[in-house]
Each structure stands twice: as structure tokens, then as C-alpha cells.
């Protein structure tokens, strides 16, 4: 058997409710494929911040550097400002471990009602099946800037978006290469009509890289019009490559179009494998439903499936995705976000039954 060491960071709120389902699924599918998982759990969270004044210890990154992968629930809770909790844990991991690709697949599953009447399941012809390839370490999420003149009438805040040639080229390459293994189409999110320094730069580098992938067709779309099109014609997209902030917004939008953000997974990838990659549901800590055992665990479970792919067990990853698909297809054991009454446990058990 192959053994993997996984760093678990359940975090806050429903993060702590969706990680046990994900590890249960990993253990179950691992047994069938000769893969075993050892977990080291870290209590890094807003609760830790309240007790110790930091989201993670000073040597936190070193403690997880040698793990094969990181599985994270969600971070953020009342009492700690979001910019403090996120820049104290999630964002440093993404940046320090050069997880510059944030891979966010989105599909409509049979049995899940999209709010859009015309959106068909991804495994049917003309169904919704897309991947947002989000740049994950630079762009609008930068530390360059500040707040000036605090408390005065002239107070202002400035944040510089930082795009590097290397950073844009590598995310474009990843997106085009991914498209060659899908339906050979890339949409690049831009805003070169309004954001005049960074976005024309982004466009020109995407254009350059595209020439290395002659089999892939691509187009550039302004983010505003693109957002509308994700609603009006979601099945027209294959791979969408986007900057950090645009990709963040598009992935929640597309996930909601596909039925619920509770299903959407993500892989924060370091493609060179110099560092561990991190897998986490797209959603946050959901304070409005936390503590009631009703969170949808599928975003975390699908993220575990992406982790299996990354660790070199694509058959196991595919089996998890099939278990998710078949569970949803019954239209039973749906959590509340999907219009049902099932609990987190009910839905987890239904998936586990299919893996037994
Ligand atoms: P959120 O994703 O936590 O919640 C948005 C809405 O979706 C809520 O109504 C919530 O109940 C629902 N929802 C989310 N996940 C669900 C699930 N699995 N099952 C059922 N319903 C689900 O977004 P928010 O309210 O903007 O953020 C809450 C906190 O989470 C904030 O502190 C935010 O900064 C943080 N956050 C963290 C991450 C992360 O750790 N990666 C991601 C997003 C938000
Ligand atoms: C996500 C989240 C994070 C992001 C927040 C919590 C910083 O929304 O993973 O999508 O914006 O990247
Ligand atoms: Mn987000």
C-alpha cells in the first residue's frame, strides 16, 4: 500500500463539520485502492487566535511543509476580522507553498436543481461542465498599499494589484494545457477596457502563450459581460482563466448557477510539487448554519477527490466523483442548500454506502 501523510486544518464553523466526511471518504476509497492516509490535525482557527493571538504558530508553515497534501475546511469567525484570519492562515499557505493555480471545477449534477431552468447536467450533451483556473498568489490580492490619514476627512486606502510576467504566463499555460485534456476551449477573463495597466498586460501574455497551443481556441471576455454569460449560457464554457479576484467571484457565481456553493471544490496547486498542495471546499465557514450538522459535505468530499488525483490516484479520485454523482442522481438525501432535509451525516453516509 501507498501511505500518505495529510495535514488537516478543519478551521472554523462548518469547516470542522465537513472535514470528517472528507477523511471518511478518503479512508473508504483508499482501502479499495491500496492507499492509506495518516492525518495530522492542526487546530489553527479563529478560536486559536482568541486564545493565543495568532491563527497559527510562528513555525506553522514548517510544520506542514513536508506533508503530502493539506486538507482545509474553512477559516473565519466572529470576533476576528476576516482580513486578519485569512491573511494569518489561508493566504500565507497559498503564497508560501507557491500554490499559484486554484482549480475549481463546476458541473450541474443530475438530481440537483440549478436555479436556471435551461442548465442541464454536465454528463449530458450540452450540459454545464466548466473549470475556473484562478490565479492564486498575486494580482489583486497584494500587500502593496495602505490606509492613510486615518480618521481624517481625507482618509484613503490604496491597494496595488501586482501582476508579473511569470505569474500570468504560468497560469495561462496551465489553463491552455488543461483545455487540451478537455474540450479545447479557453475563456480569459479581462477588464482591459477599464483597468488600463494590469489587464492589457494580462491579455498580451495570454495571447502570447496561446500560440503554443494551436489546438485550443480561446477568447477574451470582459469580466462584467462574462459574468452575465455564465448565467445566460453556462454550458458554453470549458476552461475559464482568471485573475485572483475575478476567479474568486466567478467560482461562487458558477457554483451557484450549478445548484449550490456547498458542492464546489478547489485545489490550490503547486504544479511543480516543490511544496504540498492544499485542497478545500470553495465555501467558507457559514456562520449562519454552523453547529447544526446540516452543512453540505460534498464540496469537501469532492476536494478530497481532487487531492487523490493530485497524489497520483486518479482511479480513486474518479470513484469518489462517481459516488457523488450517483448519490445526487437519486434525488434523495439532499442537504438543505440543495432543497432537501438531509443532515451532513445522512449525505456522507449515502456517499460512503456507494464506496462500500
Ligand atoms: P460562506 O461560503 O461561508 O457562506 C455563504 C452562504 O452559503 C451562507 O448562506 C452559507 O450558509 C451557505 N453555505 C456555504 N457553504 C455551505 C455548505 N457546505 N452547505 C450549505 N450551505 C452552505 O461565505 P461568507 O458568508 O461570505 O463567509 C463566512 C466566513 O467564511 C467569512 O469569515 C469568510 O471570510 C470566510 N470564508 C472562508 C473561506 C475559506 O476558508 N476558504 C472561503 C470563503 C469565505
Ligand atoms: C476563497 C475565499 C478566500 C479567497 C477568502 C476567504 C480570502 O473566498 O477561497 O474563495 O478570496 O480566496
Ligand atoms: Mn471565494
Image: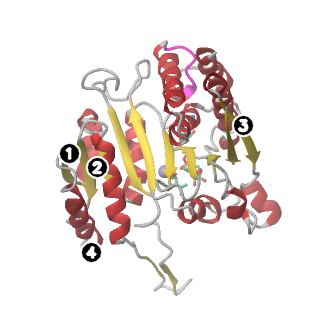
Residue located at (59% from left, 53% from top): 276
- Residue 136 lies in quadrant: bottom left
Quick check: 276 above or below 316? below
Quick check: 317 above or below 191? above
The residue labelled by disc 4 is 197
Q: Which segment did they paint magenta? A: 331-336
Dot 4: what SS? loop
Dot 2 and dot 1 residues touching (CB under 8 Å) = yes
Residue 327 horizontal side relative to residue 74, left or right: left
Alpha-carbon span between mark 1 and mark 3: 46 Å
The residue labelled by disc 2 is 176
Alpha-carbon span between mark 4 and mark 2: 24 Å
Dot 3: what SS? loop
Alpha-carbon span between mark 3 and mark 4: 45 Å
Mark 1, other Cα within 10 Å: few <14 / some 14–19 / many ≥20: some
Quarter of the image where ligand 1 sits: top right
The residue labelled by disc 3 is 291
Residue located at (60% from left, 32% from top): 297
- Sequence-wise first label, 3 or 2: 2
Q: Is residue 332 magenta?
A: yes
Q: Quadrant of the N terminus?
A: top right
Residue 211 horizontal side relative to residue 60, left or right: left
Quick check: 144 above or below 345? below
- Residue 243 lies in quadrant: bottom left
Dot 2: what SS? helix
* Residue 124 coordinates in the image, percent (x, y): 30, 20
Mark 2, other Cα within 10 Å: few <14 / some 14–19 / many ≥20: many
Does residue 69 appear in this view?
yes
Alpha-carbon span between mark 3 and mark 2: 41 Å
Alpha-carbon span between mark 4 and mark 1: 27 Å
The residue labelled by disc 1 is 216
- Sequence-wise first label, 4 or 1: 4
Amino acid at each position: 500500500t501507498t501511505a500518505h501523510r495529510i495535514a488537516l486544518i478543519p478551521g472554523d464553523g462548518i469547516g470542522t463539520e465537513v472535514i470528517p466526511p472528507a477523511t471518511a471518504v478518503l479512508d473508504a476509497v483508499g482501502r479499495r485502492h491500496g492507499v492509506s492516509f495518516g492525518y495530522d490535525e492542526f487546530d489553527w482557527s479563529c478560536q486559536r487566535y482568541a486564545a493565543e493571538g495568532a491563527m497559527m504558530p510562528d513555525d506553522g508553515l514548517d510544520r506542514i511543509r513536508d506533508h503530502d497534501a493539506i486538507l482545509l475546511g474553512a477559516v473565519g469567525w466572529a470576533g476576528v476580522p476576516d482580513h486578519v484570519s485569512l491573511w494569518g492562515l489561508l493566504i500565507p499557505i497559498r503564497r508560501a507553498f507557491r500554490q499559484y493555480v486554484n482549480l475549481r471545477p463546476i458541473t450541474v449534477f443530475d438530481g440537483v436543481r440549478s436555479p436556471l431552468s435551461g442548465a442541464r447536467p454536465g454528463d449530458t450533451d450540452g450540459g454545464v461542465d466548466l473549470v475556473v483556473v484562478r490565479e492564486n498568489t498575486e494580482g489583486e490580492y497584494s500587500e502593496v498599499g495602505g490606509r492613510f490619514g486615518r480618521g481624517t476627512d481625507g482618509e484613503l486606502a490604496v491597494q496595488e494589484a501586482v501582476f508579473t510576467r511569470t505569474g500570468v504566463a504560468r497560469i495561462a499555460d496551465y489553463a491552455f494545457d488543461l483545455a487540451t485534456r478537455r474540450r479545447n476551449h479557453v475563456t480569459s477573463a479581462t477588464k482591459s477596457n477599464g483597468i488600463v495597466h494590469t489587464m492589457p498586460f494580462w491579455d498580451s501574455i495570454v495571447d502570447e502563450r496561446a500560440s503554443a497551443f494551436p489546438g485550443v481556441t480561446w477568447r477574451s471576455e470582459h469580466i462584467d459581460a462574462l459574468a452575465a454569460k455564465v448565467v445566460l449560457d453556462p454550458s458554453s464554457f470549458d476552461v475559464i482563466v482568471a485573475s485572483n479576484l475575478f476567479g474568486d467571484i466567478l467560482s461562487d457565481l458558477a457554483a451557484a448557477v450549478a445548484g449550490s456553493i456547498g458542492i464546489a471544490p478547489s485545489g490550490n496547486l503547486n504544479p511543480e510539487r516543490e511544496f504540498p498542495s492544499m485542497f478545500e471546499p470553495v465555501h467558507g465557514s457559514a456562520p449562519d448554519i454552523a453547529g447544526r450538522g446540516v452543512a453540505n459535505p460534498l464540496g469537501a468530499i469532492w476536494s478530497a477527490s481532487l487531492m487523490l488525483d493530485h497524489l497520483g490516484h486518479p482511479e480513486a479520485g474518479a470513484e469518489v466523483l462517481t459516488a457523488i454523482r450517483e448519490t445526487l442522481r437519486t434525488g434523495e438525501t439532499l442537504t438543505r442548500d440543495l432543497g432537501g432535509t438531509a443532515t451532513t451525516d445522512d449525505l456522507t453516509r449515502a456517499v460512503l454506502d456507494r464506496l462500500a
